[in-house]
Amino acid sequence: MKGYLHLFWIAFRLGCTSFGGPTAHLGYFYDEYVKRRQWLSDSQYTQLVALCQFLPGPASSQVGFGVGVAKAGLLGGVISFVGFTLPSVLILMLCAAVLHTTSMEMRWINGLKIVAVAIVFNAILGMAQKLLPDVKTKLLALFTLTVTVLVGHPLAQVAVLALVGLVGLFLFKEVQVETTKVRLFRIRKFIGVWSLTLFFMLLIVLPILSGLTQSPWLAMVNQFYRSGALVFGGGHVVLPLLNEAFVSTEMITADDFITGYALAQAVPGPLFTFAAYIGTVMLGWLGGIVATLAIFLPAFLLLIGVLPFWERVQNNQNMRKVLKGVSAGVVGILIAAFYDPILTSSVHTSIDFVFASILFVLLAYCKVSSWAIVLLGVVGGIVLY
């Protein structure tokens, strides 16, 4: 019990101080778990990060879960996840409750919308630089962007990602990859098989149950689970999926969505805790907790399921080519989400555009932290509007 409490406290402390997004989180984890405590070797940590980057889902949260598994088994993974995620979940649920029970100045909300413009645009540029290195990937991103914007159906994103992944299989040449044989931890294959089976069962069964029962709880769980299962490329990419799931279906308003997204940028911990804000807006405190569990669950089921087979999968050239195509498509989807709802509902005047530009330059080039950008957005919104 003492070991579990110690693991929780370390993860909780990281969850209270880990600002800066998933890349920064991985740096915090390396300093704490590898350099300071030596729970994993450098090679083990590198392999864990590579696996989590390969799988859909929030990479930094998956790495934290994996470290917990390596230290104290599957229960240790759950404890590590709860500790790291709890601070941001509590803050966002509290913000959602306060915003919906008190009369807030709209000027404050307008400032947060402009913050979202700057942050998402910066994320797009960073992802494009990394994931679109050549003309082929840029064209795949353009194709995905076009389909996503012009076809308004929620399943369009899933279909176009599958298509660009298939195109990538034939479009890209083989890339020489360094092979490694580092065993992270020993999870039995039958546990991996059951975990993958549960992952796909929920992906199939939840939409059916949601359609049959018309329950708002099942509808919410289904949307969050599907979004968490289909996110490639980092936390920002969940934005268009959640927009299609909750704003387009009028489960929440665009104002609530963008406000929650901006607040999620201001708190430490994983961006996926944005789900806690949406769930609280929809169904109260319990809704926030259920939403958080639903969006993270598929990522952890996949991680547990793939770990026993990762040594073979990581060196499969065909899988890497498919993933390269999917990654390019993810950038196109994120650009589409930047256009609608972020840009269309936030930038209406020249003052909006100039303010968003200033915040972007401060964030991208002056290296001002995201929480400070949010604070500036709130103050600017009150002063300017």
Image (cartoon, rainbow, N blue to C red):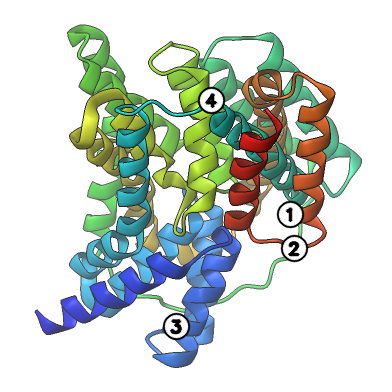
Q: Nearer the viewer, mark 2 or mark 3?
A: 2
Disc 3 packing (10 Å; few <14; some 14–19; many ≥20): some
Q: Closer to the camera, 255 or 129?
A: 255
Residue 299 in the image: state x and y as whole percent.
Answer: 39, 48
* Mark 1, residue position: 363
What is the three-letter code of the residue carrying label 2? Lys
* Mark 4, residue position: 106
With 362 as the anchor, is 312 left or right in this view?
left
* Mark 2, residue position: 367
Disc 1 packing (10 Å; few <14; some 14–19; many ≥20): some
Residue 144 in the image: state x and y as whole percent.
Answer: 72, 25
Kindly report the distance in space between the C-alpha atoms of the residues bearing marks 3 and 1: 26 Å
107 shown above or below 198: above
- Nearer-N-terminus badge (4/2): 4
* Mark 3, residue position: 32
What is the three-letter code of the residue carrying label 3? Glu
What is the three-letter code of the residue carrying label 1? Leu
Q: Which quadrant would the C terminus be assigned to in this image?
A: top right
Q: Which quadrant would the N terminus be assigned to in this image?
A: bottom left
Residue 301 in the image: state x and y as whole percent.
Answer: 31, 49
Q: Secondary structure at mark 3?
A: helix
Kindly report the distance in space between the C-alpha atoms of the residues bearing marks 4 and 3: 41 Å
